[in-house]
Image (cartoon, rainbow, N blue to C red):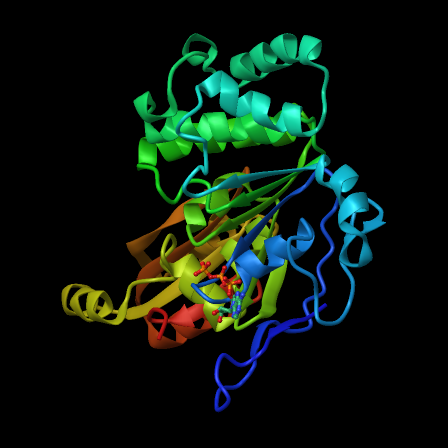
């Protein structure tokens, strides 16, 4: 599906906000969508909840083709879609209770059912004692909890989250991410999460779509995207959290301090373990000193980029690396 905006001026060119995007989100999964500003992420979410329509192609949500539905028919479908925002978008004139009640009123849920539903939601998000507080009395993290409770009020099947933690500090971010994980795991909602923070993706997403200039340039399981990012845009995002070996200046300094041949070995949990590679070094009398790197955990699976200074007979080092290359990925020095 594509979404093109007309040129803003007569001389301007049309903006291809989404350019032939073809994405399937499985029921019950968390899909992280990452990309820099202007990549098309918000446009994508707006098409999912049919606040906007594609210029070509179709958008189907829970079996409904929302891209061609009337506003009237969309009202039903939108009950299935909850949304949370970076700036929370709460009514500051209402209490916490009043904010959560709002979607129930809009959906025509009988007043008699509100009390039980709202207190259940307040308990779920951990704000039972704040029911009558005014929004401005709350911290950022508490506001986002209210946002989540409000989004869940009509018992949606899908949650769209637009930079939900970008306005929060790291501690509060972790709490909100924990809550979103429960929304997915305990309540079973499908979550589409827009973010530019890879830490958010790492802790929550099952799969990641990386967007650039309106296109999905990479799509994969979160572990694969972190362990072996393919597209340059993905590599830039991943490098904010994981170094694929020492950067050039650090490598220079390491070379001054350590003799021998410097190589970075990239391990993945389905490949050989570091011990197999070490055995290849030991068998050939090659000395190996770990000089840089670490092991990462992504959604319960590990990978690592470990840089070694290898010493000993040149031919033995070459042989050992030849064998190691059948087990792991090897980069001479560090990433260029
Ligand atoms: N209503 C509009 N009219 C014209 N151009 C638009 C409109 N909405 C978005 N665009 C353009 O489409 C492109 C994608 O915008 P979008 O907001 O989807 O990106 P984004 O990845 O969400 O960025 P951000 O993180 O800054 O919100 C941008 O070039 C933007 O200027």
Q: As drawn, is 79 to the left or to the right of 272?
A: right
Residue 271 visible at all? no
Residue 170 visible at all? yes
- Residue at 43% x, 60% y is 237
Residue farthest toward the bottom in the current orientation of the protein: 11
Q: Is residue 13 above or below residue 194?
A: below
- Residue at 64% x, 13% y is 114
- All told, the count of numbered labels is 0
Q: Nearer the viewer, residue 29 or 37?
A: 37
Percent x, y for residue 75? 74, 40
Q: Quarter of the image holding residue 83? A: top right
Q: Quarter of the image holding residue 5? A: bottom right
Screen quadrant of the C terminus = bottom left
Percent x, y for residue 201? 50, 47
Percent x, y for residue 62? 80, 44
Q: Is residue 138 above or below residue 70?
A: above
Screen quadrant of the N terminus = bottom right
Q: Quarter of the image holding residue 188? A: top right
Q: As drawn, is 194 to the left or to the right of 132?
A: right
Percent x, y for residue 213? 52, 73
- Residue at 62% x, 60% y is 219
Q: Nearer the viewer, residue 159 or 10?
A: 10
Q: Nearer the viewer, residue 40 or 306?
A: 40
- Residue at 43% x, 11% y is 132
């Amino acid at each position: 599906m594509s979404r093109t905006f007309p040129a803003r001026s007569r001389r301007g060119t049309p903006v291809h906000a989404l350019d032939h995007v073809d994405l399937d989100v499985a029921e019950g999964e968390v899909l992280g969508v990452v990309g820099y500003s202007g990549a098309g992420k918000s446009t994508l979410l707006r098409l999912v909840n049919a606040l906007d329509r594609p210029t070509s192609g179709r958008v189907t949500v829970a079996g409904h083709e929302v891209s061609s539905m009337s506003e009237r028919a969309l009202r039903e479908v939108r009950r299935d879609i909850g949304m949370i925002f970076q700036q929370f978008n709460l009514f500051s004139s209402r209490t916490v209770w009043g904010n959560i009640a709002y979607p129930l009123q809009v959906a025509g849920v009988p007043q008699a059912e509100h009390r039980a539903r709202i207190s259940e939601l307040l308990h779920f998000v951990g704000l039972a004692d704040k029911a009558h507080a005014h929004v401005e009395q709350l911290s950022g993290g508490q506001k986002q909890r209210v946002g989540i409770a409000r989004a869940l009020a009509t018992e949606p099947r899908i949650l769209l989250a637009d930079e939900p933690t970008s306005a929060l500090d790291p501690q509060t971010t972790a709490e909100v991410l924990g809550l979103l994980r429960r929304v997915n795991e305990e309540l079973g909602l499908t979550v589409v999460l827009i973010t530019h923070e890879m830490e958010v993706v790492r802790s929550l997403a099952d799969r990641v779509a990386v967007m650039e200039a309106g296109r999905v340039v990479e799509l994969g399981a979160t572990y694969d995207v972190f362990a072996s990012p393919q597209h340059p845009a993905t590599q830039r995002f991943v490098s904010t959290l994981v170094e694929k070996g020492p950067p050039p200046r650090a490598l220079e300094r390491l070379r001054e301090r350590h003799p021998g041949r410097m190589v970075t070995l990239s391990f993945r949990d389905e490949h050989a373990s570091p011990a197999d590679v070490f055995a290849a070094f030991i068998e050939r009398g090659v000395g190996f000193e770990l000089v840089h790197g670490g092991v990462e955990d992504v959604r319960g699976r590990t990978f690592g980029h470990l840089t070694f200074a290898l010493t000993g007979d040149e031919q033995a080092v070459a042989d050992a690396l030849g064998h190691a290359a059948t087990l792991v990925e090897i980069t001479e020095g560090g990433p260029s």
